[in-house]
Image: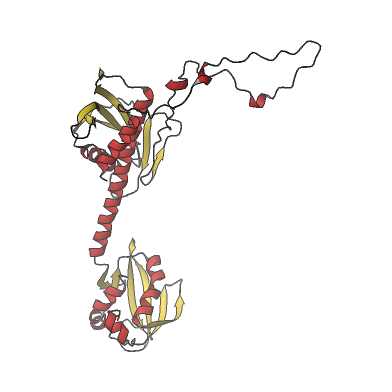
Amino acid sequence: MNRRFFYFTLLSLSISACSSVSKKHASGGFEYAEKQESKPFVVPKNLDDAKEHKKFMVNNKINHNGPVGKNMDIRAPSLVLPLAASSRVVVESEDAIIWFDKVIEDESLLTFIEQSVKDEIMSADVDYKKVQSQEKPTNSNVKVSAYESDWFNKQIESGWLFTEIESITSLRFRYELMTKPHGRSVSLKVSLIDFMKTDKEGGSKTIGSIDKHRAEIAMLNGVVAQVDYNYRLLQQENRLLRADQKLVTLGKNKQSDPAYIVEMSLDNLWDNMPIFFEKYGFDINDLNESKKIYYVDFTKPESSLWESIWGDEAPVIEIEEAEYQFSLKKMGDKNEQTVITIHNAKGKPLSLEVIQRIFPVIKVGLSF
């Protein structure tokens, strides 16, 4: 099911078409709507009044002009669905509005949400234009932008062999975005600005308040779903970039000794080093967590017949079977880079020739 079809499915729930069975109203008898309220119970003067439990009393402060019986709209209320990451709703607001908080640090939140709005509109083959916003920010530092869509058209057909158009519903929306001064929060408000419906009874530009609200919520939820989709797409692209990235390179430590530079934070790499040791023939004898040093014994792993058959055999690191020290240090001010220096049992760094020779195996192992 594509997103365009999904959106119009939601929209069709909010704008009812010609149908033999109304989805808006209940079916059955409505005699209760004709009943008159009973008169208060009168207690004779020579008797005590009955006790009244006011906790269960219904007051008279209600909308007496509201729909009753067949005119009552029984559809469940439309809700804004905060499905995208770091999205939140305004509980007190009756408008179709949602807030997004910054998730991706190297991406402009406003630009990202604007692009999602455009993607949602264009997914239905509808054009849009940038307009002057009707929102009036109380803070002069607040950025406001707005877009208006062209007509979204939905037609209902009937018939089997020969179809005919029963009705055409057309809607236009305004999308208003407001960015807080710090740029880490953006609100999106969707408003229905134009409506037309044409059926066998004629044309109308009037839409009920409930149907209007449901159409706005359906469109807003469509944009939220697009934001979520774009987030997931960006995360996938980032994962692919990391997969192609060289996570381990040759370099030097602060003392200019040959070392490996790993694109991983010091704490994360420290926690994952035992996985590397176990796979490549190192046994941990001791460790110094405060100085981030592992003391290990190296024994060339023996490959089994089954490992060679199934391709599970790990490459061998061509160094002498001896004791070594793996020292991990943070790379300057970069939190996501760590320097690994390998020392022998006497604390002397391995030579550049050894570091280069075992690098093809080390870079695979430390990429995890």
Q: Give the residue at the far right of this rendering.
A: 46
**Image position of 293 with respect to 230: above or below:** below
Q: Position of residue 349 (x, y in %)?
A: 32, 81
Q: Horizontal placement of 119 versus 265: left or right?
A: left
Left/right placement of residue 159 relative to residue 346 reads: left
Task: Using the rendered image of the protein, determine whether residue 97 is visible from the camera's viewpoint.
Answer: yes
**Quick check: 51 above or below 309?**
above
**Residue depicted at 31% across the width and 33% down the height:** 11
Q: Residue farthest to the top?
A: 45
| Image quarter (top left, top right, bottom left or bottom right) of the C terminus | bottom left
Q: Nearer the viewer, residue 258 or 181?
A: 181
Give the image location of residue 56, x and y in percent. Answer: 64, 26
The single residue placed furthest to the front in the displayed view is 161
**Which x, y percent locates residue 272?**
39, 70
**Color style of the picture:** secondary structure
In the image, residue 42 sits, relative to residue 321, either above or below, namely: above
Q: Is residue 316 visible?
A: no
Quadrant in the picture for residue 185:
top left
The residue positioned 62% from the left and 15% from the top of the image is 38
Where is residue 151? Give x, y as percent: 21, 29
For residue 346, what is the image quadrant?
Answer: bottom left
Q: Nearer the viewer, residue 354 or 164?
A: 164
Q: How many marks?
A: 0
Quadrant of the rendered structure where residue 16 is? top left
